[in-house]
Amino acid sequence: MKLKLIILLLLALVILLLLYFFPLIPSGGKLSLQYNAEVDRNSGLIKISIKAENIEGSKVKFFAQQYEDWMNIGNLIAKDARGKELDVNQNSVTVIGDDFEHQVYNYEIDLSNAIQPITLFYSVKPGSYGRHGHRGYLSKEFGLVSAGQLFLLPETRQETEIRIQFNAPEDWNVVVPWQKKDSFYSPELLSASIEDSMNNTVIAFGNFTQKSRIINDFNVSVFSFFEWPEEHKQLISENAFKLFSYQSSLFGAKHENNFFAVFVPFAEDEGKVFGGLWSNGLGFEMPSSIERNWELYSHRIHHVFNAYEPFGMKEEGKSRWFTEATSSYYEIKSLSDLNFYDFNSHMKELYQQFKAEQPLFPNSILSEDYKKHYSELEFLHYRKAPIVAFLLDKEINLDEFIKFLYSKHGSNKNSFNVKKELEEFSGKSFDEFFAKYIEGTQEIKIKEFE
Ligand SMILES: [Zn+2]
């Protein structure tokens, strides 16, 4: 009897040892990812853990959606269910970004001897400086990041369920437009991809005053830095609502979704702070109510309806200039329509800038913009394109054309050709207009702004 028990115990031990060295390959199923972000305002670090279960295959590659210098990933390790450290093969790809070269990192984890769930641990230090200021930021006062600066994603085609949890200091709030269930957020957003949501959603930490309003079915919330004077918070939330209403009404867009606008102070070094922008929100500095910031805000809201998933539109490559043409033109048009300032004087200023820069890019063609690099792109998108939009507004009613376009192509249905749409809308030919200004380099002269 005793012998039998000893044999059974030995057998059990052998099975356990075998399982340890040759774990069963998981039987498939939904990949479950549980993210935890711990905000440490004293060190300026955000500590991330990702618990992953049901990964198919013997390797898994986690990748950064944003640039290494925007994320500043440190100390990445991976462990399996027994706490055994797994081999991580790190490699990087160079990407030409908006203004300079960036590194994007991949972390390949060997799962051949791992028992799932596995957990990745790393830290992120947001705050490097880019075109719009600090790309993400965390200080003792507040934090502002985009989700892509925090979360690595696995490269797998498996069906995936993502749950996200934040651990912020007790006296701080977490501001994120995702839906919350129990203590977890879900990045799923209508028909947009989870990748987009995990990359572009803006997240803020700290103390904010929230004001909310339903605008064209959107639940718009404006979060202003708590310590600012009441009048400043009141003014910026009113402006943010007004411009959101202007832009969504311009497109005739109505969607039931959260939109969060977060406004923060300058960084400690007096630098600008930019969290990012997408269809569910944006965040940047607004320590005083300056016109240029409202132009940028208006431009960014315009993109919710003419570019970003899931509510935006999709122009063909050769029509891409039009996305920036109306976004940049309506910076000025929206602010003047809402009596922030005078239309003609601001258009004249833009026209003078355009004239001054034009000699630098004499052969620059709008419909070829997608082939261009940054400084030329900046001229095409932010100088020439809005001037051409102004000319277009003289030919047709641009407000009405935008509504027409959105009713046909809103929410990313099909890609379309702007010229064809213009001709359908107006019933006249745009051959000459396009030959001169879009596909050619005809000199633009606007008498009233000379
Ligand atoms: Zn733009």
Image (cartoon, rainbow, N blue to C red):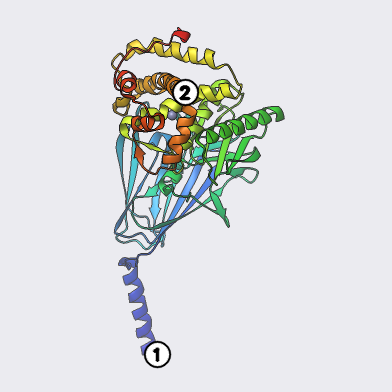
> In this figure, which residue is indicated by the disc labeled 2?
329
Crowd band around label 2 with a 10 angstrom C-alpha radius: few (<14), some (14–19), many (20+) = many
Which of the numbered marks, if any, corresponds to residue 107? none
Where is residue 215? Give x, y as percent: 60, 40
Q: Is residue 6 above or below residue 347?
A: below
Chain-order first, disc 2 or disc 1: 1
Numbered disc 2: secondary structure: helix
Residue kind at label 2, given as amino acid type: Tyr
Residue kind at label 1, given as amino acid type: Lys
Q: Is residue 395 above or below residue 29?
A: above
Q: Is residue 324 above or below residue 197?
A: above
> In this figure, which residue is indicated by the disc labeled 1?
2
Measure how far apart labels 2 and 1 are at the Cα level: 88 Å
Answer left or right for 415 relative to 401.
left
Where is residue 32? Give x, y as percent: 43, 59
Where is residue 220? Give x, y as percent: 59, 40
Q: Quadrant of the C terminus?
A: top left
Foreground mark, 2 or 1, reads 2
* Residue 135 in sight: no
